[in-house]
Image (cartoon, rainbow, N blue to C red):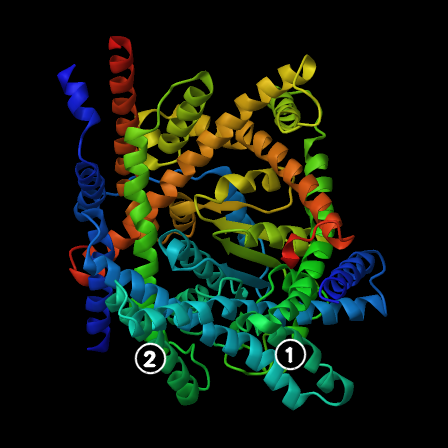
Amino acid sequence: MLTIIGIWLAAGLTIAIFSFLYKDNPLYKFAEHLYVGVSAAFSIIYVWAFDVWPMLVDRFRTERGVEKWILIVPALFGLIMLSRWIPKISWLSRWAIALTVGIAAGLGIIGQIQGILIPQIQGTMLPLTTINNVILVVGVLASLFYFYFSLEHKGVLKGGARVGIIFIMIAFGASFGYTVMARISLLIGRLSFLLRDWLHLIR
Amino acid sequence: MELFKRLGTIDRRIIYLLVALVVIIPLLLRLVLPIRISEPVRRAYEAVDRLPPGAVVIVSIDYDAASEPELQPQLLAMLRHCFSKDLKVILTGHWALGLPLGEIGLNQIAREFKEKKYGIDYVNLGYRPGYRALMVGIGREIRDFFATDYRGVSLDSLPLTRPIHNYNDIDLLISLSAGQAGDEWIQFAGARYGLKIMIGSTGVVAPDMFHYLQAEQIEGIVGGLQGAAEYETLVKHAGTATRGMTAQSTAHILIILFIVLGNIGYFVMRRRK
Amino acid sequence: MKREIPLAITAITGILIVVTFFIPHQPFGGIQQRLLFWYSIVLGFTYLLGINSLVGSHLKKVQARHSGWESSIILLGGFLITLVTGIVSWIQFGTPFLLGSSFMYVYTYMIIPLQATMFALLSFFIASAAYRAFRARTFEATLLLIAAAIVMIGRVPIGAKIWSGLPVIADWIMDIPQMAAKRGIFLGVALGSIAMSLRVIIGLERTYLS
């Protein structure tokens, strides 16, 4: 019974959102605001259940000695992050932000060099023995040329950038094609739900 | 000329209605077209298929309900493949709002394979914030971040996770990604620790994965609903993706028709001016 | 104090993380692991930041009966119900995430349809945009349009039915020219990102402190 009520509720909400296609209306507004409220509360439970509780509270109960008391440091950083709520001391949140920015930047440098630069350049060092390999190498270099703004695009650079834009446009076209595919898939998903789970018109 | 003028001012709601119809009709008629397997998906399938029984696979739920129609069928097909090959599955994820989708999928497929037991054949670790920090940290010791599974049970008390400490104990990672998480897995777990990675992604993300495949940084790509349909075909279990591909085809044809019509109108009007 | 300490924290943590990559053994390995663990905890708190202002602004709207206050009641109601079901499920099952709990009921029958449908709307907008705005005005735009059309039709089953060569061409576009351009773009992004990270660590880039 609960499942049936749930499916009707989900179908109602789906139709409420789709009603926006006709025009903006109270039903859509209702669904939209409900979504924001429900998602916000969901995030709170999530942070508590998967962050604060297992990583701070649980560990504080089970750890001993230094490992136990050092947990006060991240807890403090977490709390001062919330100081943004209080304008007078909101500057304190910069400490917590600085911690996350510093770590993310440090990781980013290594990640980009080791995960992108080196392997991607290695992947481009192909023997120019097939047409595809030649196109690939030319495409990578020309695309890089296009984004090189330190020198004016004249002469060889202009030619390179011109070839680059051809490759870039093909890439954007392919991405657009895939994006259309993705958006239509989402519609198929929702309409399948209505036709299958709600109306039982398809299997 | 009048026709093109009128076509140019067509109400958007008529366009919407046509889009809805070209999706609904093939779904109602249950039309199914044969699925052609592309190379990136075949490689992804083979990466799972060649693992020996007992190998451990991490499945990372890096999407939420916004991409559920594309990635949930991928998850189901891949879990079916893993369980049929007697692989062990560890579920985690980086998208807070999406992780329950992983749990729903895992439960659904585990029910199909009745002999599969939680804690022995599959475990759900849950979620921790931190993306790249987590990915790098797990390379040293998984317990530093996940001392327990999502229900609060210690990893040391579950037979599957007891011997697992870091990526050395993992045979393959599958990231089902609707955003940056796939890239981060490749950069921070693949490049740094040599972890084998296979990407399942939305259609939007898929084109940004091909350069990783060419550079052999990933094992394969399963992209969008089409990728899911291909994987379903390979595991010989047609699901929502396979059934949706006819509607996908008709919708694409309609959109191409829109582009052609729009352009004919544009050129006719331009010539007239 | 208000700027110097955060700049020092960023520099020290950033440098430590980079150094640990080259010297992974103790003490650096242990320090990095601790920093990463802290990062994970602190990041969780950032998710809470927006919620205070969201709930606060809608509460004010309801109290002042500003236009649209009825919608704000829905938002606050949804917020409260989800929060309560989360807490109740947690007490009841030891975790709010057990399938069958009231919290997961809210997820399955409210969050999934709402979020998924919100994004499904985009399919209609992209179709409308294709009709109204996707014009072959220039050579570049024509290239984009042709590539899009070939990929769109070649990557779905009907493409092979129309002409068996279509999927082959679509695959080639994805594997060679598309991939080459994306590689060029991502190499550029990587260089830019490395430069930006270095600027952050040495304190030249300070916008995050504002």
Q: Is residue C16 left or right of residue A53?
A: right
Q: Depth check: give the residue in front, C80 or A93.
A: A93
Q: Is residue B231 left or right of residue A190?
A: right
Q: For the C terminus of chain C, which image quadrant?
A: bottom right
In this figure, which residue is indicated by the disc labeled 1? A75
> Who's the residue at 70% across and 78% down the image?
A73
Res A187 label:
none
> Who's the residue at 20% across and 60% down the image?
A27
Q: For the N terminus of chain C, which image quadrant?
A: bottom right
In this figure, which residue is indicated by the disc labeled 2? C102
> Who's the residue at 34% across and 51% down the image?
C119
Identify residue type, mark 2: Ser
Badge 2 marks a residue whose secondary structure is: helix
- Distance from label 1 to label 2 (Cα)? 30 Å
In terms of image quadrants, where is residue A120?
Answer: top right
Badge 1 marks a residue whose secondary structure is: helix
Give how far across and how far down residue B230 sits, in percent. Answer: 41, 45
Identify residue type, mark 1: Ala
